[in-house]
Image: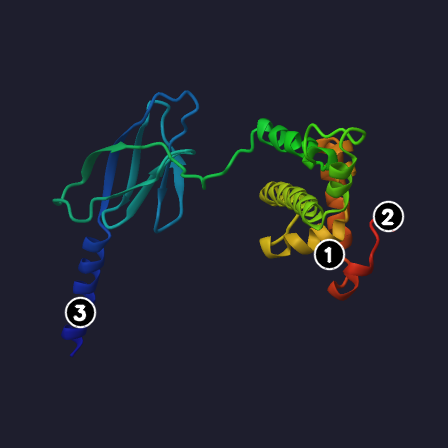
Amino acid sequence: MKWSLLLIVILSCLWSTTDAQQVTIYGQVYHRSDPNFKLLVVNKRTGLGDFGRPDGSFIINTNKQDTLLVGSLGYKTEAITVADSAEKSEYYVKVYLERLTFTLPSVTVMPQRELDSIQKDIQGLGYNQRDYMLSGIDPFQSPLTFLYQQVSRKERMKRNAYQVINEDRRRNLLKELFAKYVSYDIIDLDKSEFEDFIDFMNVSEAQMKAMSQYEFVMFTKNRYAAFRNTPPRLRQDIDVHD
């Protein structure tokens, strides 16, 4: 019984010695020419490491079963292991490190000319009854035609239609601006809220034309803060000048 126990202990020691075979690894790391390159080699099992030489070479003593992590700031880390290699006391390895690359999410850059284009369209807003009356009519030479035009139900409906079209243009321009403001985190609105916010802003066509782009952004931020702090059921009762 004693001999059997002694044999087991001896075999265990031999197994541990073989499993923990000490080896020396000579490494050479290759990378793109980088004057700030600093090589670091870390034993994954122990968590201990050391810097390599300026020329990218390193020497490290380790267990054959260990894994070495070789890397540098801004480069991909490579793992080295010689566990499956032939039994030797020394190993020579070459490591090629690649630069880290990052794929950033796509962003939409809003050129200044886009805002200028919207501002130009805002300046083009307006409705003038004279623009939509029959041309070439002299009220003194054709008084009946002139008066007919002024009171005709059909003509009134036509002028009302142009007013509606102008109002739609105004609201669409505001929605276009809101979409850009949302993309730049100036305001946080869902598209489904645009109509309600336009009503809450209560900004007139004259105000839109009078304000600069910066002034309109600040005005919008101010009204947005009030919009968020006002319960939905009360928003229609809030006056823009309050």
The residue pinned by badge 3 equals 8
Q: Identify residue type, mark 1.
A: Arg
Tell me where residue 113 appears, x and y as whole percent.
58, 27
Q: Mark 2 or mark 3: which comes first in sequence? A: 3
Q: Is residue 3 above or below residue 64?
A: below
Q: Position of residue 162 (x, y in %)?
A: 66, 43
Q: Dot 2 lies on which element?
A: loop
Horizontal placement of 104 versus 167: left or right?
left
Residue at left 67%, top 48%? Answer: 154
Q: In terms of sequence position, does the residue under pointer 3 or pointer 1 come before the other? A: 3
Figure check: 81 above or below 7: above
Q: Quadrant of residue 97?
A: top left
Q: Say which quarter of the image contains residue 220.
A: top right
- Secondary element type, mark 3: helix
Q: Residue at x 68, y 36 (%)?
A: 132
Q: Tag 1 or tag 2, which sits nearer the N-term?
A: 1
Which quarter shows the N terminus? bottom left
Residue 208 appears anywhere in the view: no
Q: Which residue is mark 1?
A: 228
Q: Which residue is mark 2?
A: 241
